[in-house]
């Protein structure tokens, strides 16, 4: 799959039938602070522009994405047959053509699939979701042994830009003292947090051995990525994953 503009196709050893895509801020019709491929309806952008961008995205997908109302929690929903937009921060699908999706603008998208290409999933993993266990919940809901899963870490605010308070650090250390490795002292009462390392630690703890991606910083690259921490008035990108109907296994 070749993505348009500078959108990202994850580089990971997923089976051929697993397709995934990360949009960037480029290639759409929004203007000003939202320029140009804003997909978020709750950002303050002209809704007509957002819907136009979503239609452009739809041309690259087998179905309309199963959007979520993301609340920085740890709830996982089944995307197959999903009606409406539930409050959740992760979804799982087993049917060909179902598009699991999350929107991002500093929080990390974590993509999942199994070696057999029978199940896919996605999680919206900011610090709150990570600390609450959104990754572990998504791994569990795949119903697959963790050692048979692949994970890919998408663009997120990087470890040189993500300043947090001691409360954030303690939220992770309470669950796992090893999380201290993901925090660098910055100034009085403040730390720099490494979301990529925290996600890798969480995946390792629940048995996922094959982890790829990580390292693309949304905060650093203003020409390619939206960043809420950098620009409080900004758009949203999307991370999407699905099983290709053209390569679905016959019943």
Image (spheres, rainbow, N blue to C red):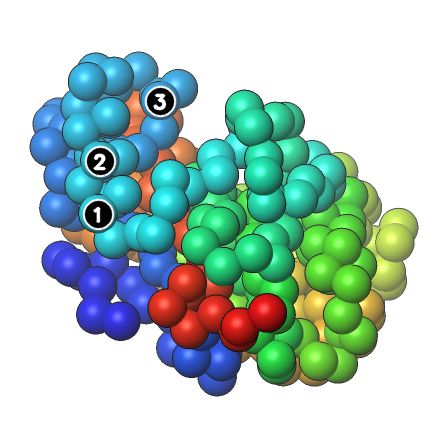
Q: Mark 3 to mark 2: distance in Å?
A: 13 Å
Q: Within the image, what quadrant is residue 113 found in?
A: bottom right
In the image, residue 222 sits, relative to residue 1, either above or below, namely: above
Q: Is residue 58 left or right of residue 83?
A: left
Mark 3 vs mark 1: give the one in front.
1
| Residue 103 coordinates in the image, percent (x, y) | 44, 40
Mark 2 lies on a secondary structure that is helix
| Residue 241 coordinates in the image, percent (x, y) | 46, 58
Between disc 3 and disc 2, whose residue precedes?
Answer: 3
| Residue 77 coordinates in the image, percent (x, y) | 68, 40
Q: Is residue 163 left or right of residue 103?
A: right
Q: Which mark is residue 59?
A: 1
Q: Mark 3 to mark 1: distance in Å?
A: 19 Å
Q: Which mark is residue 55?
A: 2
Residue name at image x 35 percent, y 22 percent: 41
Decide which of 162, 4 is in the foreground and name it. Answer: 4
Mark 1 lies on a secondary structure that is loop
In the image, residue 8 sits, relative to residue 137, either above or below, namely: below
Residue name at image x 58 percent, y 62 percent: 120
Q: Are marks 3 and 2 in contact (CB under 8 Å)?
A: no
Q: Are marks 1 and 2 in contact (CB under 8 Å)?
A: yes
Is there any visible trace of residue 100 in the rendered image?
A: yes
Q: Within the image, what quadrant is residue 155 found in?
A: bottom left
Mark 3 lies on a secondary structure that is loop
Q: Within the image, what quadrant is residue 78 found in?
A: top right
Q: Mark 1 to mark 2: distance in Å?
A: 7 Å
Q: Is residue 184 left or right of residue 17?
A: right
Q: Which mark is residue 41?
A: 3
Density class for disc 2 (Cα within 10 Å; few <14, some 14-19, many ≥20) is few
In the image, residue 206 sits, relative to residue 110, either above or below, namely: below
């Amino acid at each position: 799959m070749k993505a348009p503009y500078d959108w990202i196709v994850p580089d990971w050893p997923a089976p051929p039938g697993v397709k995934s895509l990360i949009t960037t801020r480029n290639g759409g019709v929004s203007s000003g602070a939202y320029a140009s491929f804003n997909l978020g309806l709750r950002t303050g952008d002209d809704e007509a522009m957002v819907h136009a961008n979503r239609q452009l995205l739809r041309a690259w997908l087998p179905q309309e994405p199963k959007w979520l109302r993301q609340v920085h929690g740890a709830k996982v929903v089944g995307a197959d047959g999903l009606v409406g937009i539930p409050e959740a921060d992760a979804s799982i699908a087993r049917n060909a053509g179902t598009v699991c999706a999350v929107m991002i603008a500093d929080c990390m998208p974590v993509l999942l699939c199994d070696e057999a290409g029978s199940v896919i999933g996605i999680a919206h993993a900011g610090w709150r979701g990570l600390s609450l266990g959104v990754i572990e919940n998504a791994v569990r809901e795949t119903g697959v042994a963790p050692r048979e899963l692949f994970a890919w870490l998408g663009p997120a605010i990087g470890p040189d830009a993500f300043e947090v308070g001691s409360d954030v650090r303690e939220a992770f250390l309470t669950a796992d003292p090893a999380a201290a490795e993901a925090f660098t002292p910055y100034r009085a009462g403040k730390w720099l947090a490494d979301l990529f390392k925290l996600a890798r630690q969480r995946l390792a703890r629940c048995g996922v051995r094959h982890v790829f991606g990580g390292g693309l910083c949304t905060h650093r690259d203003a020409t390619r990525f939206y960043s809420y921490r950098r620009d409080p008035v900004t758009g949203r990108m999307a991370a999407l994953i699905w099983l290709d109907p053209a390569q679905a296994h016959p019943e």
